Amino acid sequence: MSVDFAAARLNMVDSQVRTNDVPDRVIQDAMGAAPRERFCPAGHDYLAYADAEIEYAPGWCLLTPRDMAKLLHALSPRAGERALCIAAPYAAMVLATIGLDVTLRLPAGAARQTADKALAGYDLHTDAGELLVPPSQGYDLVVVEGAVAEVPAAWFEALNRSERAGARLGVIQRNGPVGKALVHVRSADGVIGRREVFDATPSWLPGCEPVASFAF
């Protein structure tokens, strides 16, 4: 049975994006055009537009469409901005569709191989390396696809340090059953503020899980 992915994308936007307080037509149109099914394991592409994460490689998951839409909406991406997507291949696809200058950071391995295949034909940069150490600095926007227990300081260092305020980092921080999607914004004087935007329960980003503690 074949799937009409164009219709499925439209239904996703109507039922999971627009109805979850994401009125931004730029984000709606980009998500309605980005082929999320490319990330699905063989035989599971019918799940591409369900209200669920996609495990595109063992231990590596895309955010749900709802969470991705709300996080991007909170970040207000603009065409021409420089974006770093940390383990965020679907975000990279959407942001490249909008017209940002995108770099995707993923370590070598199955996740990187799947992302490279899914993103073939997209005008973006890919960089293999450790997630906790961004490839460079000067990004207007940094987005992370997965939950982290703590936000590494290096991710803040990746933000644009120019006098123009507004460089921002979007990440879901989680230390229990429910996490908080956070947007960190660098001001013109270098101070980084934070605001909570919504609750979410995504899978942990590999290497960013809480450290187990023991009580005696």
Image (spheres, rainbow, N blue to C red):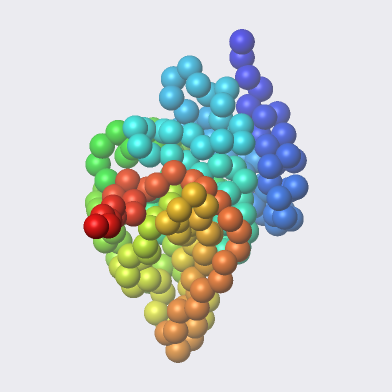
Quarter of the figure with the N terminus? top right
Picture layout, residue 151 above or below residue 161: above
| Residue 196 shows up from this direction | yes
Q: Is residue 100 visible?
A: no
Q: At which x and y percent is residue 24?
A: 70, 57
On the rendered image, what quadrant is the C terminus found in?
bottom left
Which one is in front, 30 or 45? 45
Q: Is residue 188 above or below residue 92?
A: below
Q: Residue at x 63, y 19 (%)?
A: 3
Q: How many marks?
A: 0
Counting from the top left corner in percent of width and height, residue 80 is at 52, 63
Outermost residue, top side: 1
Residue 200 percent across, percent down from the top left: 55, 51
Left/right placement of residue 183 relative to residue 134 reads: right
Residue 108: % across, % down: 25, 41
Residue 42: quarter of image: top left
Residue at the far bottom in the pictured view: 189
Splitting the image into 4 quarters, where does residue 35 fall?
Answer: top right
- Tell whether 33 sits left or right of 178: right
Q: Is residue 123 above or below residue 57?
A: below
What residue lies at 52% left-to-right and 64% top-to-bottom?
182
Name the residue: 44% across, 62% down.
Answer: 142
Nearest the camera: 163 or 196? Answer: 196
- Classify residue 1 as left or right of residue 106: right
* Residue for point 43% across, 39% down: 61
